[in-house]
Image: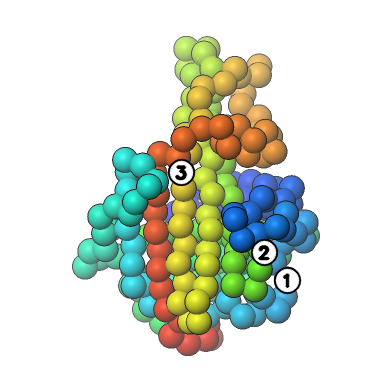
């Protein structure tokens, strides 16, 4: 994933996180305007072995087939960082100690990141539950039409002991009118709009903590 894309995801994800996020049936919190607390960040930081990576491209009711191949990064790191006065945890995949160390440095610098899978979690719902959000308002149709390829993605991490499960739900959004040939993004409106649209794709990442972050 190129840094330009990551920088956009970071900005939008933290902007969305700062406005709060409603939880599930077991959650009565609205999220934190300061992101993830330092003790919670510390408790999640570490190196993890990937145990499951699936994707259902046809809906979100059930998991899809495995995406794991011989070339898939078999590890990932969770690294704490901060930007725009918001603390967050970033997940970045890696293949060995050296690449995991590079991923940690890139998150903390920040720098360019090339990874098979990655995401940002900026909302603390509980000690063992983090959420994250990202969205795009698309781009103007070249023929002067509306903003197309709009999407809203929501991440939900749950921890049990040393094991994690992260579900990402991808929600495409309808085309929307452009504004002077641009597609300005309003995170709050995108979040509200996504709540009225069906989820189209589900990705699941599972992993088990194997140790601290590499030096």
Q: Earlier in the sequence, mark 1 or mark 2?
A: 1
Residue at 42% x, 78% y is 208
Mark 3 highlights which residue? 170
Q: Quadrant of the N terminus?
A: bottom left
Residue at 48% x, 82% y is 162
Q: Dots 3 and 2: beta carbons under 8 Å?
A: no
Please tell me how many numbered marks the rendered image carries: 3
* Numbered disc 1: secondary structure: loop
Mark 2 highlights which residue? 124
Q: Dots 1 and 3: beta carbons under 8 Å?
A: no
Q: Nearer the viewer, residue 54 or 93?
A: 54
Q: Earlier in the sequence, mark 1 or mark 3?
A: 1
Q: CA distance from mark 3 to mark 2?
A: 20 Å
Q: Dots 1 and 2: beta carbons under 8 Å?
A: yes
- Above or below, 98 against 176 in this view is below
* Numbered disc 3: secondary structure: strand
Mark 1 highlights which residue? 37
Q: Earlier in the sequence, mark 3 or mark 2?
A: 2
């Amino acid at each position: 994933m190129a840094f330009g894309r990551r920088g956009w995801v970071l900005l939008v994800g933290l902007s969305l996180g700062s406005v709060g996020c409603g939880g599930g049936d077991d959650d009565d919190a609205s999220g934190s305007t300061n992101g993830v607390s330092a003790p919670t960040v510390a408790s999640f930081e570490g190196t993890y072995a990937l145990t499951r990576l699936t994707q259902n491209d046809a809906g979100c009711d059930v998991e899809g087939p495995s995406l794991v191949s011989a070339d898939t990064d078999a590890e990932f790191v969770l690294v704490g960082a901060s930007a725009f006065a918001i603390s967050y945890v970033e997940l970045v995949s890696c293949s060995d100690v050296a690449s995991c160390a590079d991923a940690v440095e890139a998150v903390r610098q920040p720098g360019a990141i090339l990874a098979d899978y990655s995401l940002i979690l900026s909302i603390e719902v509980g000690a063992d539950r983090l959420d994250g959000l990202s969205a795009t308002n698309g781009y103007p149709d070249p023929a002067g039409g509306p903003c197309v390829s709009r999407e809203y993605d929501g991440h939900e991490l749950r921890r049990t002991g040393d094991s994690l499960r992260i579900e990402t739900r991808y929600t495409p959004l309808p085309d929307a009118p452009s504004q002077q040939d641009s597609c300005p993004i309003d995170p709050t409106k995108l979040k509200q709009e996504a709540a009225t649209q069906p989820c189209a794709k589900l990705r699941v990442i599972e992993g088990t903590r194997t140790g601290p972050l590499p030096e």
